[in-house]
Image (cartoon, helix red, strand yellow):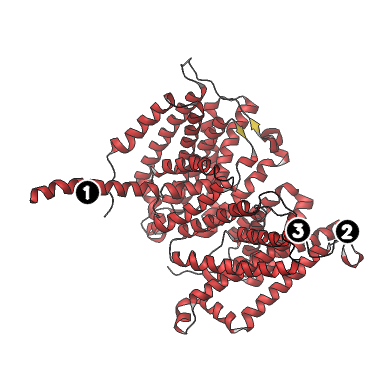
Amino acid sequence: MMASAPPRLLSVGMPIAVACAAPFVLSNYHIFQLTLVLVYAIALLGLNILTGYNGQISLGHGAFYAIGAYVAAVLMDRFGVPYWVTVPVAGALCLVVGFLFGLPALRLEGLYLALATFALGVAMPQLLKYKPFEPWTGGVQGIVIVKPDPPWGLPVSADQWLYYFTLAIAIAMFVLGANLLRGRIGRALVAIRDHPIAACAMGIDTARYKSLAFGISAMYTGVAGALGAIAVQFVAPDSFTILLSISLFVGIVVGGLSSIGGAFFGALFIEFVPSIADQISKSAPWAIYGVFLIGLIFLMPMGINWAIRLGWARIARSLHAAPAQSRSR
Amino acid sequence: MEQLLSQILAGLATGGIYASVALALVMIYQATQLVNFAQGEMAMFSTYVAWAMIQAQMPYWIAFFLTVGISFVMGAAIQYFVLQRIRGQPVLALVVVFIGLLVIFNSLAGWIFTSTIQVFPSPFPAESPFGQHYISAHELGATVVTLVLITLLWAFFRFTSLGLAMRAAAQNPVSSRLVGIRVGQMLALGWGLAAAVGSVAGMMVAPIVFLDPNMMSGILLYAFAGALLGGIDSPGGAVFGGFLVGVLENLLGAFVVGNELKLVVALVVIVGVLLLRPSGIFGSVQVTRV
C-alpha cells in the first residue's frame, strides 16, 4: 500500500512557522548554520529533479554549485553588483551551462553519465585555479566578499537578514519545484526515468526534457551556490572539490530520492552530521557518510522522507483501527 | 626535440600506471558490467598497507607481495559481502554503494594510517640506467612491472581453465552455472584480481606522486579516460588507451595547456570519446534490443 502523506498543515505549514521563528531564539552561529541548511536544501532539490525524478545520475553537481558561487562572488567583488542581483544571474548562467552540458549527456546513460559528471566534478577546482582567469577568480586565494546589511533600517542583525533572504528564496524555489514536478513536465520526467521507450512512444520529446531537466537542476544548484557564497563570505577553488559533489549526492540519497521534502532532511544531514562526527575524528565524517550510504541502500533504500511517511501511515492506521475495534466489541 | 622525447618517455611511464588501473576497471566491467568508482581508493589503501609494512622494517619485495595478497582478499571480500547482496538493483543503488566504498576507504586510510603526505620508497636505483637521462630507473622499472603484469594476466585468461571459467561466468552467468561453474566465486575472484592489479599500480605510482589519501583521484580519472579510449570491454584496448592517455597528458601538459589543466584533459578525453565513439577504439559496439 502506498503510504499516505501527513496533512499539509503539518508537513508544510509547521516547518515554515518554525523556520520563521528560529532566528529569534538562536545564536548568530546557529543562524548561519541554518542558512546553510536552506542553501543545501535548494541544491538538493535541484539534484533530485535530475537524479531522483529523471534518473540521470550526476556526481558532479558541486561544479554547478561552484559556478553559482563564483558568479556571485565575482559580480559582487569585481563589479560592485548588489548581492540580490547576483542570485538570479547565477541561476540563469547555470541554467545555460547545465543545458549545454546536458546535450552531450543525452548520449550517456547510467554509469557512463555518472562517470562523465564525476570527471566534471574532479576537474572543476583546476579550472577555477586556471591562471588566465585569475584577474576575476583570484586564483588559489579565492575571493572574500562582504556580508550584506539589512535594508530599510530593519531591526535585525545581518545574519538574521541573510537567513530570511535565503528562506524567502528557498520557499519560492520549492513552490516552483513542487508545481513543476506535479504537472506535465514532472510526469514526463518520471516517465522518461521509468521507461524511456514507452515515454518516447507516448510522444514525449525525451531529448528535450532530459536536457531541460539538466538545465533546471543546474539552475537550482547555481542559485544555492550564489546564496552559499554570500553566506560564507568567501569562495576558493578548494571549497568545491569532488567531496562537495559527493556530499550533495549523499544528501539526496539520505533524504529520499524523488521526494521534495527529502531535500530538507538531506540538507540537515550534510550540514550537521559532519560536525558531530568531527568530534570523534577528523576523517570520521566521510567514513560515516560511507557507512550511511551503504547501510541505507541495504535497509532503507527510499531515504528518511519515505521512512517518515511510512511511520505516519502506521500511526494513522492504528488511530483509525482503535475506534473500529471498540465498536466491534 | 630532446625535451619532446623525454616527455614522451615520462608519459609512457605514467601511462603504464594508468594502463594497469584501466585494466583493473575493465576486468571488473567484464565480470559484472559495472564501473568501480572505488578502484582508485582501494589501490591507495593497499599502498598504505605496503607503506606501513615498509615502515616496520620489512624488506620491500616481501611487503610488495604481501600487499598484493592482502588486496586480493580485500577485493574478493567486498564482492562477497557487499556487492553480492545488491545484484540486480538499479544502477543508482550501485553507484551509491561505490561512492560509499570510495569515501570509506578514503577516510579509513587517513584514520588508520595518516593523512599527511608521505614519501613512498622505490625499489629501483636512484640514478638513471644505461647512461641516458630521458627516463629514470623508477619510471623504467614501473613500465616493466606493468608490462609483466599485463602479460601474466593475459596468459591467465587465455591459457588456464580457471581463466576460461571466469570469462564464461562474465559473459553468460546462466549457462556457466549450468555447466558447473560457481559464478559467485568467479566474480569474487575477478574483484580480487582487480584489487591486486590496482595495488601494484598504487605501489608503482606512489614514489612519483607521493602517498596521501587523495593520490589516486586524478589517476582514476586518467585510467577511466584510458579505458574508455581503448574500449571499456577490451583489456588490450584499455592498456593501449592507458599508455596513450599518459603520453597525451604529458605532451599537452608540457606544451599546450600547462600543468594546471591536466585533469581537464582527462575530462575532455572522457566526454569526447563518449560523444564521438562510445565503444572506444577496440571495443565492440553494444546493440540493445528494444
Q: Residue tagged by mark 1?
A: A317
Which image quadrant: the N terminus of chain B? bottom right
**Residue A59 appears in view:** no
Q: Nearer the viewer, mark 1 or mark 2?
A: 1
Side (left or right) of A144 relative to A36: right
Q: Position of residue A242 (x, y in %)?
A: 59, 48
**Residue A73 appears in view:** yes
Q: Residue tagged by mark 3?
A: B207
Q: CA distance from mark 1 to mark 3?
A: 63 Å
Label 1 lies in what chain? Answer: A
Residue type at mark 1: give it: Arg
In the image, residue B148 sits, relative to residue B83, either above or below, namely below
Side (left or right) of A121 relative to B143: left
**Depth order, front residue of B51/B263:** B51
- Label 1: element kind: helix
Side (left or right) of A241 relative to A51: right
Label 3 lies in what chain? Answer: B
Q: What residue sits 46% from the left and 58% below the top?
A: B93
Q: CA distance from mark 1 to mark 2?
A: 79 Å
Q: Position of residue A203 (x, y in %)?
A: 38, 55
Q: Are marks 2 and 3 on the same chain?
A: yes
Q: Are marks 1 and 2 on the same chain?
A: no
- Label 3: element kind: helix
Which image quadrant: the C terminus of chain B? bottom left
